[in-house]
Amino acid sequence: MGAIFEIIGLILFSSVKFLFAPSTAYALGYTFWQTILISLIGGWLGVFVFYFAGSFVFDWWSKISKPSDKKFSKKNRIIVWFKNDFGLLGITLVLGFASIPIVSLLAAKYFRHLPITIYALLASTVVWAFLLTGISVWMIPLFKGMF
């Protein structure tokens, strides 16, 4: 019963902190394929929840809010620069480093009109799950002797 709660916790952890979830799962003794599965389920859960919740909130907000004078902060300028220069591909590439909620919300805000957006996020999650798990499989044995 405790293992089920541990797996559920790892899935939830993977849905918000994807960068650290594969190494945590592998360090806890899960195999390569179990770590991939846990990471994918959690990553996909996070992408679905945050992307569709974000889309709903952004659509709702655009219906009830009045147009106003927008003030550009440094953060807004960086986001617009990144969106214009790198687009959806850039957002999917940073999914492994940035958290899934942030990337999914940015994709919902700027790219929800593209039908490929959700699929690009899910595919990026697969690539990052394999990459991060592979790095964990390679690095964790090096650190086990240190502690």
Image (cartoon, rainbow, N blue to C red):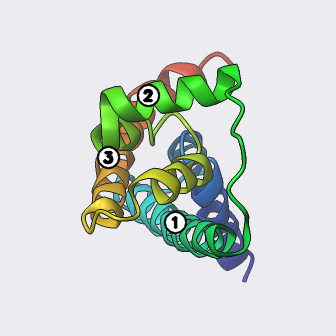
Q: Position of residue 146 (x, y in %)?
A: 64, 16
Q: Is residue 140 above or below residue 20?
A: above
**Badge 1 element:** helix
Q: Position of residue 131 (x, y in %)?
A: 33, 38
C-alpha span from label 3 to label 1: 22 Å
Query: Of callouts 2 and 3, which one flags the residue occurring earlier in the amino acid sequence?
Result: 2
Would residue 4 appear left or right of 110 to someone viewing this image?
right
Front position among marks 3 and 1: 1
Q: Residue drawn at (28%, 56%), measured in percent from left and top? A: 120
**Badge 2 element:** helix
Q: Which residue is mark 3?
A: 130
Contact check, label 2 and label 3, Cβ < 8 Å: no
Q: Residues within 10 Å of mark 3 (few under 14, many from 20)?
A: some
Amino acid type, callout 3: Phe
Amino acid type, callout 2: Phe
Question: Image quadrant of residue 85?
Answer: top left
Q: Which residue is mark 2?
A: 82
Amino acid type, callout 1: Tyr
Q: Is residue 110 above or below residue 114?
A: above
C-alpha span from label 2 to label 3: 25 Å
C-alpha span from label 2 to label 1: 19 Å
Question: Image quadrant of residue 93?
Answer: top left
Front position among marks 2 and 1: 2
Q: Residue drawn at (54%, 69%), measured in percent from left and top? A: 55
Would residue 68 appear left or right of 30 to someone viewing this image?
right
Would residue 8 appear left or right of 79 to someone viewing this image?
right
Question: Image quadrant of residue 74?
Answer: top right
Residue 51 marker: 1
Residue 69 marker: none
Q: Residue drawn at (45%, 35%), measured in percent from left and top? A: 136
Q: Residues within 10 Å of mark 2 (few under 14, many from 20)?
A: some
Query: Of callouts 2 and 1, which one flags the residue occurring earlier in the amino acid sequence?
Result: 1
